[in-house]
Amino acid sequence: MNIPFIKCHGSSNDFLIIDEWSNALELTEELRISLAATLCDRKVLGADGILYISKSNRADAKMRVINADGSEASMCGNGLRCVARYVCEKLSVENAIIETMKAILSVQKEADIFQDVLTYGVEIAPVSFDVQSPPNECKWTDVSQ
């Protein structure tokens, strides 16, 4: 099976992006986890994780983060910025909505920080600093209106 990917970085994290959204890929959960464990090994390609982009019924695209150890993260801000650029460029837009495990988040192109360094801003919410009661539920934003 040929699986195209892109290697990207965001603020000292590096990721592989696998686009299940516009490529005709039918990856199983086991294969996603196995790819992360294999490809993210620093002796192979090396990355902090794989950002899987897929279709969403609630947003412009959906992002899943599978860490190098095969675990899934509910969110990754640096990864979201990489996905923001990828999705915005794919759609030829400057703003998009990305579905993550627990929230639907806005992303947008920002003014470049340095010449030729593309910059994307992301909304990271909900945020809780209460370690005794982490959020286990999320109220989804209706993006259809």
Image (spheres, rainbow, N blue to C red):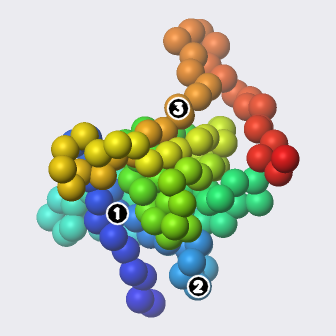
What residue is rendered at 29% in x and 45% in y?
112
Q: CA distance from mark 1 to mark 2?
A: 18 Å
Residue bearing the label numbered 3: 124
| Residue occupying the point 59% across, 52% down | 96
**Pick the front one: 34 or 95:** 95
**Left or right position of 120 against 112:** right
What x and y, as percent, mark residue 56? 70, 60
- Distance from disc 2 to disc 3, alpha carbons, whole Å, reads 30 Å
Tell me which amino acid carries mark 3. Ile
Please identify, in this view, whether the residue under mark 2 or under mark 3 is nearer the observer. 3
According to the image, label 1 marks what residue?
Answer: 16
Q: Earlier in the sequence, mark 1 or mark 3?
A: 1
Q: Quick check: marks 1 and 2 in contact, CB under 8 Å?
A: no
Q: Return the x and y of residue 67 as percentages of the image width and height.
A: 40, 50
Say which element carries label 1. Answer: strand
Residue under label 2, please give it: 24
CB contact under 8 Å: marks 2 and 3: no
Residue 52 visible: no
Q: Amino acid at mark 2?
A: Ala
